[in-house]
Amino acid sequence: MKELILYSGFAGITVFIGGLLANYFNHHIKESPVKYEITHTMMSFGAGIILSALALVLIPKGLEKLELLPFTLSFLFGALLFLVIDQYLSKKGNQTATLLAMLMDFIPESIALGAVFAIEPKMATLLALFIGLQNLPEAFNSFRDLVQSGFAVKKTLVIFFCLSFFGIAGALIGHFLLSDYPNLTAHLMTFASGGILYLLIQDIIPESKLDKKYLTSLGAIIGFLVGVIGEKLI
């Protein structure tokens, strides 16, 4: 149990660390074209990691356990629900797509971490490392989005600190409640996949692009490669 809390705690604390790094970057690095390009590259890098989690972890686990019709319904429900949420937030002027994508990725993976911990501890250890690495750039981008949408810096850091504990909560839920219900866990992952894919295509990828700049595209490729390496190690 201590190891599960430790691993899931590491996976979650990178959310807060990413927020701290983004706050430092915002206030201690002078405005310049290079800073602007680095920011968009980080956004693109995060999109690549999210995409790798979608393609290598969430969807394959859903396909492994679910028949075609249940899988399709869960996937479409996730996409449609986050379409509605995104439309609502857009009308209010909030820039929270990256935060939503991070949570849609972070929570089901944390639950999966808890569910597999008792069966495959080594896989759970590497999965925790993988989750922690992808949370870092996602939190970096989410922090900047929230501050730009009007959230105060201190309030945003408090939110990120609280979100850091979602990893532990999710892992405990998966370990005690869902380890005997693989189909329910698969539905959760598939639902998250639909929402993540919608947010990537609608909001995150378009915002990461810069005209006549190619480093951002390379950032997405490197981010996806990080996910591939993590999945290969697992």
Image (spheres, rainbow, N blue to C red):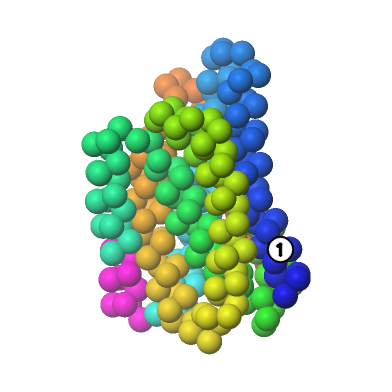
Q: Total marks drawn?
A: 1
Q: Position of residue 37 (x, y in %)?
A: 54, 23
What residue sits 56% from the left and 59% below the top?
166
Q: Is residue 190 left or right of residue 165?
A: left
Q: Residues within 10 Å of mark 1 (few under 14, many from 20)?
A: many
**Closer-to-camera residue (27/217):** 27
Q: Position of residue 134 (x, y in %)?
A: 60, 50
What residue sits 45% from the left and 20% below the top?
212
What residue sits 40% from the left and 41% below the top?
96
* Picture layout, residue 134 above or below residue 35: below
What residue sits 58% from the left and 80% below the top?
176
Give SS at disc 1. Answer: helix
Q: Position of residue 131 (x, y in %)?
A: 61, 56
Q: Quadrant of residue 234?
A: bottom right
- The quadrant of the image that shows the N terminus is bottom right
Tell me the amino acid under the disc marked 1.
Tyr
Q: Where is mark 1, residue-wise?
A: 7
- Asked whether the viewer can see residue 69, the reply is yes
* Picture layout, residue 197 above or below residue 191: above
Q: Quadrant of residue 136?
A: top right
Residue stretch in magenta: 67-76
Q: Is residue 109 left or right of residue 94?
A: right
Q: Is residue 171 left or right of residue 108?
A: right
Prevailing secondary structure class for the magenta stretch in the rendered image: helix
**Closer-to-camera residue (72/121):** 121
- Asked whether the viewer can see residue 45, the reply is no
* Picture layout, residue 71 above or below residue 200: below
Q: Residue 69 lies in magenta, yes or no?
A: yes
